Image (tube, grey):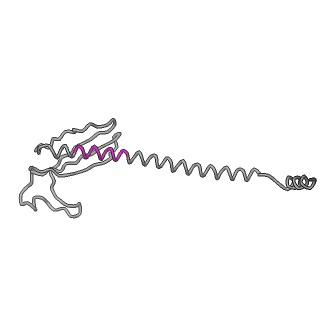
Amino acid sequence: MRWLSEVRLKFNREQNGVGLLESLIAASIVAAIGVAFMSAMFTGYRSAGILDEKIQAEILIRSQIEIIKNSPYDESGNYPVSVHLPTQYTMSINVTSPTCIGTADNCVSLEELMGEPITTIQEITVSVQHGGMPVQSVAFYKAIQ
């Protein structure tokens, strides 16, 4: 039984323990992992907020577009905002007469296509802002039916 106590003593004498440098390195590694984890969590939280804001804006815009599509054609282009907006959301409706159809690089004049000025088509752009910052905008056309 005496040999067991000698082994234990030898083991205790040979063990040096953890030094200050090793402790600092371990603490810095744990801190770096913690900072990376918190950064990832914050980025995910912010992304979820932005996505929620865009989804809310899309719902509001689609609702307003359906209301405008179902309303009669207004030559003055005075379509009021008819949806209930949550706090800090604003909506603007911009009505213009389109001058051309196509992309910015390949735009064909409506007057050239139809042979006369077209006054029966409106390009309506519905935009939503949240806290004064633009979130989303959708444009569509409305014509006399």
User: Residue at the location (85% across, 52% down)?
Assistant: 12
* Residue 127 within the segment the image draws in magenta: no
User: Residue at the location (90% across, 52% down)?
Assistant: 5
Residue 119 in the figure: left or right of residue 31: left
Residue 110 at x, y percent in the picture: 12, 58
| The furthest residue to the bottom | 106
| The furthest residue to the right | 2
User: Residue at the location (92% across, 53% down)?
Assistant: 1
Residue 115, relative to residue 122: is it above or below? below
Report how many numbered discs are placed on residues in the image: 0
User: Residue at the location (19% across, 61% down)?
Assistant: 102
Tell me the magenta residue range.
52-64
| The furthest residue to the front | 1
Majority SS type along the magenta span:
helix
Asked whether 3 or 13 is in front, the reply is 3
Residue 14 at x, y percent in the picture: 85, 56
Asked whether 5 or 84 is in front, the reply is 5
| The furthest residue to the left | 116
Residue 92, relative to residue 114: is it above or below? above
Residue 13 at x, y percent in the picture: 87, 53
Residue 46 at x, y percent in the picture: 44, 46
